Image: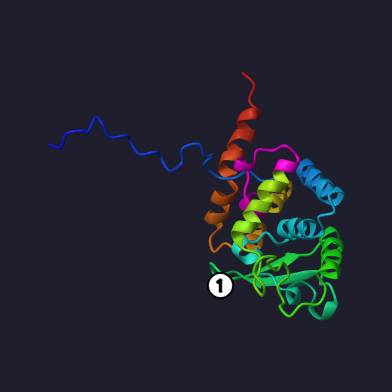
Amino acid sequence: MAQIDLFRMPKRPWNSGRIIGAKPSLKPKHIWGIRQQLRTAGKVRDLALFNCALDAKLRGCDLVKLRVSDVAPGGTMRDRATVIQQKTGRPVPFEITDASREALSAWLALRGKRADDWLFPSRSRPGEHLTTRQYARLVGEWVAMIELEPRAYGTHSLRRTKVAMLYKKTGNLRACQLLLGHRKLESTVRYLGIEVDDALALSEQIEI
């Protein structure tokens, strides 16, 4: 039987100091606050990216690879778009709301003509798109603007925000599944944490 080395320092757990578990979605007041902060700061690209992330409900790896031709082919802004997911190969449709259309139009005017077709090109790597790491860093900056804990939120917070609101309003899981591009309904249930939320909501109605 091996003896424990009392003089060797134990390894630091990989999740030490980190907030683990599913990242919460944003609330309407958070969305309003971030939009206001980005407008005030004149961050045209960030506002377009933020609004687009909420509408598209895409994983970060798919969002950063959006092309101008996906949302505004020939310079005309679409009302809806469809993207093939990298992870599943499934097409995912999404709407482009008025807020996103306005923000994207302002960003495209500032972006100007470029040789590449990336909707959100990298500022440090010519010809490349924004990376998922850069996107995650921006999300941290956005939530910090409204005094939320950056470690508690992430790119999936934006991905699940709109579908979480949709489920709470309609209870339509199938619609949420289609918008997220999940293969199985069970994946949508787990992703949104619906069973836990519903159980807590029911429990809150019981007075003892």
Q: Name the spot of residue 127 as percent of width and height, x first.
A: 66, 75
Where does the magenta region start and end? 144-160
Query: How many numbered markers are drawn?
Result: 1
The residue located at (84%, 72%) in the rendering is 77
Is residue 168 at all visible to an observer of this figure?
Answer: no
- Residue 5 among magenta residues: no
* Quadrant into which the N terminus falls: top left
Q: Name the spot of residue 57 as percent of width and height, x first.
A: 67, 59
Instruction: Give the quadrant of residue 185.
Output: bottom right
- Residue 155 among magenta residues: yes
Q: Name the spot of residue 8 as percent of width and height, x first.
A: 27, 34
Q: Which of 30 and 189 is in front in this view?
A: 30
Q: In this view, does 89 lie to the left or right of 118?
A: left
Q: Nearer the viewer, residue 98 or 43?
A: 43
User: Given the current orientation, which residue lies at the most extreme left position?
Assistant: 1
Q: In this view, does 105 lie to the left or right of 157?
A: right
Q: How would you rate the neighbour count of disc 1 (Cα within 10 Å): few for under 14, some for 14-19, many for 20 or more?
A: few
The kind of residue on which mark 1 rests is Gly
Is residue 80 at all visible to an observer of this figure?
Answer: yes
The residue located at (87%, 62%) in the rendering is 102
Instruction: Give the quadrant of residue 2.
Output: top left
* Quadrant into which the C terminus falls: top right
Image height of 115 relative to 101, above or below:
below
**Colour mode?**
rainbow
Q: Is residue 184 left or right of residue 2?
A: right
Residue at image mark 1: 89
Dominant secondary structure, magenta: helix
Label 1: element kind: loop
Q: Name the spot of residue 113 as percent of width and height, x first.
A: 81, 77
